[in-house]
Image (cartoon, rainbow, N blue to C red):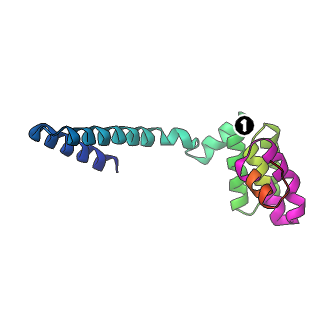
Amino acid sequence: MTLFLFAAAAGFTLAAVITDNKAMLYVGLGIWAVGVLSALWLWTGPRRQGFRTPEAARAAAEAGNPRAIRALAMDALSTGDDARAERLLLVAIDHGDVDSMWELGRLVERRDGIDASDGWYRMAAENGHFAARRYLKRRDLLED
């Protein structure tokens, strides 16, 4: 996609210079800007994701990174190890990870029912978790 944007920008810019068309030049410059932003987005992608390997996540979790702890918990959930996932989510919550509150609510809801999970959803909502707030509002359990 980024290469296409750069090719289109070059084409528009070259055509604008040849034809002395300012509107086409502005379009070309706009496409250049979008291409550069797209390239930056792609370049910073691995940094946004955080953990490229399970070993990197484990190392970060041992250092106390709550996102890494949550990532390991989600891995445990995907393998069906709910008890381990719950333990890890509780550790991440102790480190202040709001997303872990939401995920623990989902785990408890699946295991024990919707009423048992309300406390975790409420905790996540009170700490600013957008999806938890919407979920509780939809169930008329949260006021504005």
Q: Residue at x 78, y 37 (%)?
A: 96
Residue 34 appears left or right of 54? left
Task: Return the residue nearer the eye: 49 or 132.
Answer: 132
Q: Is residue 7 above or below residue 40?
A: below
Q: Secondary structure at mark 1?
A: helix
Query: Main structural element of the magenta stretch: helix, strand or loop?
Result: helix
Residue 128 screen position, x and y as percent = 75, 42
Q: Is residue 70 above or below residue 96?
A: below
**Does the magenta segment cover residue 79?**
no
Residue 112 appears left or right of 95? right
Q: Which residue is disc 1 drawn over?
A: 62
Q: Residue at x 40, y 39 (%)?
A: 37
Mark 1: give few (<14), some (14-19) or many (20+) Cα within 10 Å: few
Residue 77 picture quarter:
bottom right
**Does the magenta segment cover residue 113?**
yes
Residue 32 picture quarter:
top left
Residue 18 screen position, x and y as percent = 9, 39
Residue 12 screen position, x and y as percent = 20, 44
Question: Mark 1: which amino acid?
Answer: Glu
- Counting every numbered tag in the picture gives 1
Residue 5 screen position, x and y as percent = 30, 47
Task: Return the residue nearer the eye: 2 or 14.
Answer: 14
Q: Residue at x 88, y 52 (%)?
A: 119
Residue 126 appears left or right of 3? right
Q: Residue at x 66, y 37 (%)?
A: 60
Which stretch is magenta? 105-132
Q: Is residue 104 above or below residue 25?
A: below
Residue 62 picture quarter:
top right
Q: In the displayed image of the protein, which residue is found farthest to the left?
A: 18
